[in-house]
Image (spheres, coloured by chain):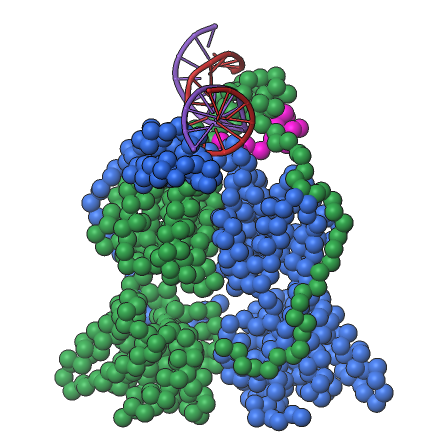
Chain colours: A blue, B green, C red, D purple
Amino acid sequence: MRTDGVEPAPPTAGIVQRPVRDAGRPAVQRVTIRDVASLAGVSVATVSNALNRPSIVAPDTLERVQEAIARTGFVRSTAAGQLRGGKSRTVGVVVLDLANPFFTDMVRGAEDVLRKHGYMLMVCSSDESTEQELHYLRLLEEHRVDGLLITPAGHELREIAKLAAYGVPTVLLDRDANDEALCSVTVDDIRGGQLAAHHLLELGHADIAFVNGPATIRQCADRREGAMTAVRAKGRRPRRDVVFREIEVPALTADHGERAVGALLALEPRPTAVICANDLLALGVLKGLASARLAPPEDLAVVGYDDVTFASMLSPALTSVRQPKYELGATAARLLVEEATGGAHEHRSIRFEPELVVRASSRAPRAIRP
Amino acid sequence: MRTDGVEPAPPTAGIVQRPVRDAGRPAVQRVTIRDVASLAGVSVATVSNALNRPSIVAPDTLERVQEAIARTGFVRSTAAGQLRGGKSRTVGVVVLDLANPFFTDMVRGAEDVLRKHGYMLMVCSSDESTEQELHYLRLLEEHRVDGLLITPAGHELREIAKLAAYGVPTVLLDRDANDEALCSVTVDDIRGGQLAAHHLLELGHADIAFVNGPATIRQCADRREGAMTAVRAKGRRPRRDVVFREIEVPALTADHGERAVGALLALEPRPTAVICANDLLALGVLKGLASARLAPPEDLAVVGYDDVTFASMLSPALTSVRQPKYELGATAARLLVEEATGGAHEHRSIRFEPELVVRASSRAPRAIRP
DNA sequence: GTGAAAGCGCTAACAT
DNA sequence: ATGTTAGCGCTTTCAC
């Protein structure tokens, strides 16, 4: 991707050796609950109680135990507890790619909720490979995770449903559960497309282009469908003819957005507004327009999708459809905790509404609208 | 932060109820190694061997065991294994904020390496709170992680060193180990500052401003120091006087960058180039310059730091100092695995070199240089 | 090559 | 309120 010039820099990293302090495993013997018990002069059961149900142990005994714990530096082992009780205090989180801000924000939302309930997150990137996903699922099962948050890589939910049927509370992220007995948390992409188109129509645009990714991606298809719905609704009104044309590009990247500008400007007549299936595409379109000496929103109004961080920082700032990423993860985590904790649980599909954030790229900065 | 207009959107998410399939915990009994053993007509020891040392078990026995495993759907329990053997096949990863792309990329690098060694990642965001960090460290210890990758929140490394001394292989991320007996992986920020300043000096700039964050942040101080070093080196040569002035802002955000433009343009005489302590600041500066109808690089050359994704997508594309984020994480993970696996291990501090990526913001796009 | 048995560190009945 | 004890599922000697 990068074709820019690069300053020469040493290819290898500098390495500083420091003296060996502890070769191999330092033979520090782990303190067990038994050590604590004998030091405190009580039984292991009492220590266990002091740990898990402090209210039922006598105040002075409790104190002695706590002191013994502090003195020995005892740290309980989750694994041992899990063996008896079953809970691993761990949930698996499988996303397509942790480096993608969409997923990162989602995971962060999940983390904040799960932390409060004492769960650790085992985070995995499937890289959209069902094989890698399956590998991770297997590992998560071996670790006996108490729950699973997952954005499935493939269309097939069988393996995931199997895990869920085995008693692992599971919530699908950004993916509908269809008929499977699972919880899911999604964002309404059809509505998002509608919001974008509706906004432009309201501004008076009657010739809208849609720069879209592959129709095989569900999100792309939905967003387009939403936009078309809005256009059709408008078009039906008397004395109103709205043109809607689509340009499909092979991937949702800035590069393809920039290249799409050629096709966009070649349209006859030239559209007055363009919706992009995501912000990267929109960014590329903005770049291409700048090269062609065209300035949004006057020459062409531009709307993106996702509202990534930099959307608001661009000049002109990019109008975009925001998805509640953090909330998505947080809500999924809440469902998970509910299912993992509560006895009776009804599987639910929660669908979030996207939100249009209007900025300069679709609206003249100083324009006054009634 | 967002003061833009927002299209009305329903505040509550849509909820769809689906019929209850399994109330409470489905009473699916976990298959144990014993079940497999009896189905295969062998002892549990043999199953264990078939699992861990298949070469020492007779081919036909092995086959019978594997069939029994497949038929029963047996999945071994890591926890039980850990109890005997000690390994949890898990490493803790503590960063300041998982939602920050710098850390996300690092974690991704670590994941890709650790996956190959069968480790799962327990990811934690400390939010720069030593308290939260401590909480997580405690939990990780309870989970008996086989290793720890951490960007410490505070200056105090005592608690971390204690864990390390307890036998948990530990690698510091983007932080020097100083005198503690730990591995660390860092990027040379002084050199990064140097690269940025040197580049501008080479282009002939003799009046450079540095928009910096708080000097209390080590990275900020180092980058500034590096830039000053380069300037001083240049200034020493005869007939060459280089001016270097600093503008300190309270936080590394685009907002503060934009606001700094006022102070920047008020400098007498006005500098011809500006280095920003990170790309967000640079982005804000670019925005502010655009408002002031000034166009980089002619009116003012701009250099950022970090080379975030959008740096290359801006117009003009932003010159920036890149940090090998992914490699940082991957290398740290490799050190970790080495320490966790190998017997004798020497603690090492690996320092990466940043890399200057030159783009239009510091160099006229069509300028030809010999 | 395979099996019997003794734990790993903890929890949870059940006694006292 | 506290102690005794029997496992949880697995690995690992040590016999056979």
Position of residue B273 measured from the top left corner of the image (x, y, whole percent): 32, 84
| Residue A299, image quadrant | bottom right
Q: C8 left or right of B206?
A: right
Residue B69 highlighted magenta (yes or no): yes
Residue for point 33% across, 36% down: A64
Residue A290 highlighted magenta (yes or no): no
Position of residue A156 measured from the top left corner of the image (x, y, whole percent): 69, 48
Q: How many labels does the image show?
A: 0
On the question of residue A300 being in view, the answer is yes
Instruction: Name the one closer to the observer, B211 or A46.
Output: A46
Position of residue B109 measured from the top left corner of the image (x, y, whole percent): 44, 54
Q: Against A97, is B89 above or below?
A: above
Instruction: Name the one closer to the observer, A318 or A109.
Output: A109
Q: B40 left or right of B82?
A: right
Instruction: Name the one closer to the observer, B342 or A8.
Output: B342
Residue for point 53% across, 76% down: A311
On the question of residue B88 being in view, the answer is no
| Residue A363, image quadrant | bottom right
Residue for point 34% across, 76% down: B250
| Residue C13, image quadrant | top right
State the quadrant of the C terminus of chain B: bottom left
Residue for point 60% across, 46% down: A341
Q: Is the magenta stretch mostly helix, strand or loop?
A: helix
Q: Against A363, is B86 above or below?
A: above
Position of residue B88 measured from the top left corner of the image (x, y, whole percent): 44, 38
Q: Against B299, is A258 above or below?
A: above
Magenta segment boundaries in residue numbering? B64-80
In the image, farthest residue toward the right: A238
